[in-house]
Amino acid sequence: MKTELLNEFYLLQKSRASVDYLEVMEERVYMPVKRVNRKMTTWIAERGRMLMNLDMGLNSSLKSLREKYLKF
């Protein structure tokens, strides 16, 4: 029984050896990491654009308020 299990394990290893491990790594590790990186960079870029638009709006509002009420 033990030798049969060892033989089966050996055959299983040989059958797995034909699988290209680089493809497995690419599929299971690198692609999810790339997706997460892409999501994070787009999220950060969108947040940055939003903050810059808010800053520009605030600056223009403050400028118009200064011109209107703070005339020296």
Image (tube, grey):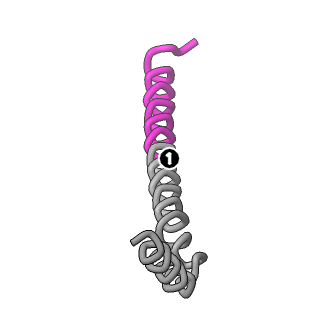
In the rendered image, residue 14, in percent from the top left (x then y), is placed at 54, 84
In the rendered image, residue 42, in percent from the top left (x then y), is placed at 47, 55
Location of residue 54 by image quarter? top left
Q: Residue at x 43, y 73 (%)?
A: 5
Q: Nearer the viewer, residue 44 or 11?
A: 11
Is 39 covered by the magenta stretch? no
Q: Residue at x 52, y 78 (%)?
A: 10
Helix, strand or loop at mark 1: helix
Q: Nearer the viewer, residue 18 or 65?
A: 18
In the rendered image, residue 35, in percent from the top left (x then y), is placed at 46, 62
Q: What is the chief secondary structure element of the magenta stretch? A: helix
Q: Residue at x 51, y 31 (%)?
A: 59
Q: Nearer the viewer, residue 3 or 19?
A: 3
Screen quadrant of the C terminus = top right
Above/below status of 22 relative to 42: below
Q: Which residues are magenta?
A: 49-72
Instruction: Give the labeled residue for mark 1.
Output: 44
